[in-house]
Image (cartoon, coloured by chain):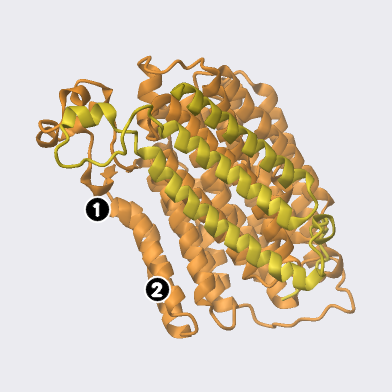
Chain colours: A orange, B yellow
Amino acid sequence: MNPLIPIMVILPICCALLLNLFHNKDKTVKILAIVVGLVLPIIPLVANYGLHYFGGYSPLIMDPGLASEVPSLITGSALNIFHPAITYTFASAQKIFIFILGIVAFFAIFTSLNEIKKPSGVYAFLMFMGTASISAILLSDDIFNLYVFFEIAALTQVGIILCSGVERNYETALKYMLLGNIAAPLLLLGIAILLGLTGNVNITDIIYSLKNGLVDPQNPSFLLAGGLIIFGWLYGSGLPPFHSIKSAVYSKALPHGAALLQAFSVFTFLALGIIIIRIFSYLPLTQWVIIIFSLMAMILGITMAIMQTDFKRIIGYLAVGELGYIGLGLGMGTAFGVTAGLFQAVNEAIITAFLFIGFGTILYKTGISDTRKLGGLLSDNPWVAGLVLMAGFAMAGIPPLNAFQSKLQLVQASIDAGFPELGIIMVILSIITFMTFVKVFYTIYLRPRPQDLKIINETIPKSTIISLVAFLVICLVLGLFPQLVTDNLSQFAQGLI
Amino acid sequence: MFIDVQLASFFTAGAIIVLGIYAALFLDNIIKKIIGLSFITEGVNLFLVTIGYKPGGVVSIFLPGMSREWFVQNSAYPLPYAMVLTSIVIGASTLAVMLGIVIILYKKHSTLSASKVLRDDEETGDAGE
């Protein structure tokens, strides 16, 4: 038992509750949020791999004392090895994901505390609560516990939109909730069917039941459960048909909020995607469903980004498109493909946060996100423009930045797996992503400044620039030394396949 | 007869879920949509309760005088009930947030028509802060 494993969830929850309590005490909110934000990425680095059984209830086979008091009817059956309580699993992949989530959360919170004139305890509460929920989703081996945190994460996302003050944010929040309240109960229904068939909500135990013939995997109810869980996965991560609402959600949040929201989507996508692969991988259909929805996300996300005029919406659609790359990696069904997909997820969480906070400087300076009303901003902050340019290059996969490595691995993996067509599509869509970014960059920074454009904030906060530089450093480090994460991810991928 | 009760309960849950999805997707009034969403949640809760149903079983509380073997064989499975309790709390929370948003939107738009309130809004580009 490793006490640091539940701390990854408990600490941000406690911090969130305290921040809510200290609302209006600006200095306390700032200090508490920054200190806890700094600690969040450190915990996964120092924690040992292992399992955590809530309440100390390990499987009976590991607790001979308790097993001796239980009727032989139980100890003589598979129940002897089943997990009686919620179990958290902390392995090599979780270490990387929770570390990256912690980094994005810290810089999003750090930026927000300095960009917003009066730091809000409620806003910081929502950011920490969301981070705790996604950490729990990544750690939990219990699919119902995952559902509970999935719902909490959805509520915090709505809260972050409501706190933004952006025009029509309430309408978008309601639309997101209406769709979510169809998708989430259907996800729960899928979990309920799995419970009905296997008597379990622990994922490892469900897989044990399947592999040892305790359940008929060809049972149509099992397929229905798979379909419902996939539907919940599409909603949680913003894949089609939910791509439009997801990008609207990003555009209605403040840039630092959107930076964190996209990281939530990426890690929800991964967590649920991995569960779908673990439970339903015996069905050939699963691989194709993941590939088809991922392709749709790439094509729809990137082509719709071209048509937008609001840069927040453009990044939102690009973020949805980039999710498709991750899905293709997972869907290839090879250890190399899955490793490349997971690496792409890590990179996307960093790069999209980099882009949101980078372009957020424009919103901070002008209060405008419509590219048609912007222009000539290069001379105001050429260094910041340079950082934003690097973020765009990173997303498009230009060397030596991190996405170059992951996208190259994805193309190689697609050829190895016998899907060279996917590699071609990925390259073409990367070029379109680059073109979209260059168009936006030119419109905002390089073309002549419109006469009626007013600057409302002259100086960009130092915290924002520090965050951008930190993201660039991470992109460069991961681009130059990808093995820092791919070794861990490869271990996990081999175990998964 | 007991199997029939369970089957009937499953069908009722299914019917409530389908009714809820219909209301959420096809009715224009936002409050009616939200009622439909509650139907979906409650249908799933009923489904969960039905899974835990055991014909002739007892509530899964170990009372003095019960033998362990008898209790193991006759108690209903408690996990679905624990899940339903959590689901009810989640449902109530999301319902409260949705209704709160609807109050604000009604004050702003003076209508509860989803086609008017939630019409697809292409960005104005104004951050509106």
Residue A17, above or below A322: below
Q: Position of residue A326 (x, y in %)?
A: 58, 38
* Residue B40 appears in the picture as rendered: yes
In depth, the one of A174 and A342 nearer the eye is A174
Disc count in the image?
A: 2
User: Callout 1: residue from which chain?
Assistant: A
Q: Which amino acid does label 1 sit on?
A: Pro
* Residue A484 appears in the picture as rendered: no
Which residue position is annotated with label 1? Answer: A3
Q: Where is residue A335 in the image (x, y as percent from the top left)?
A: 47, 26
Q: Where is residue A394 in the image (x, y as percent from the top left)?
A: 62, 50
Residue positioned 45% across, 45% down in the render: B84
> Which image quarter: residue B129?
bottom right
CB-based contact (under 8 Å), mark 2 and mark 1? no
Which residue position is annotated with label 2? Answer: A18
Helix or strand or loop: what does disc 2 sit on? helix
Helix or strand or loop: what does disc 1 sit on? loop
In the rendering, which numbered label is found on residue A235?
A: none
Residue A435, above or below B1: below
Q: Residues within 10 Å of mark 1 (few under 14, many from 20)?
A: few
Residue positioned 55% across, 78% down in the render: A114
Q: What residue type is labelled 2?
A: Leu
Locate residue A166 relative to residue A351 in the image: left or right.
Answer: right
In whole angstroms, how far apart are the C-alphas of marks 2 and 1?
A: 21 Å
